[in-house]
Amino acid sequence: MAFPKTVSVQQIQRQYRTIFDQVMKNKEPLIVLNNNKAEVVIIEIHQFEEIQAKAERYDLEMAKLAVQSYQKENSAGKLKKLNSLADLADEN
């Protein structure tokens, strides 16, 4: 994977339409630099939606695993009801 291309804030101010069209055509991220520091990334909308969908699937999978872990530990009698944070600190 090649390093993403960069563009300055000033270039975007002067050529935003050309730059946006390039991002949409090439479907490659473009890092926007301000004073030679990366500030934001421009990506094509479908890539953004794909990233969001992947993040949502990951979150759902992690939630399912947490529920499964809870159910397994609960059925094994490994859970203890805590009434305060002090109870948590007393766990050994």
Image: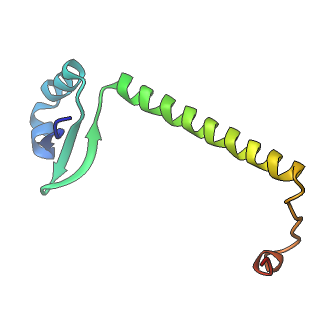
Query: Residue 13's x, y, as percent?
Result: 14, 39
Query: Residue 65's x, y, as percent?
Result: 68, 42
Q: Is residue 58 left or right of residue 6?
A: right
Choose top left, top right, bottom left or bottom right for residue 11. Answer: top left
Q: Nearer the viewer, residue 60 or 48?
A: 60
Above or below, 53 relative to 80: above
Question: Most extreme residue toward the top, as rendered?
Answer: 25
Name the residue: 15% across, 29% down: 19
Above or below, 16 relative to 84: above
The quarter of the picture where the C terminus appears is bottom right
Name the residue: 43% across, 26% down: 50
Q: Nearer the viewer, residue 32 or 82?
A: 82
How many numbered circles does the render carry? 0
Q: Is residue 72 left or right of residue 2?
A: right
The quarter of the picture where the N terminus appears is top left
Choose top left, top right, bottom left or bottom right for residue 87. Answer: bottom right
Name the residue: 76% across, 80% down: 89
Name the residue: 30% across, 26% down: 44
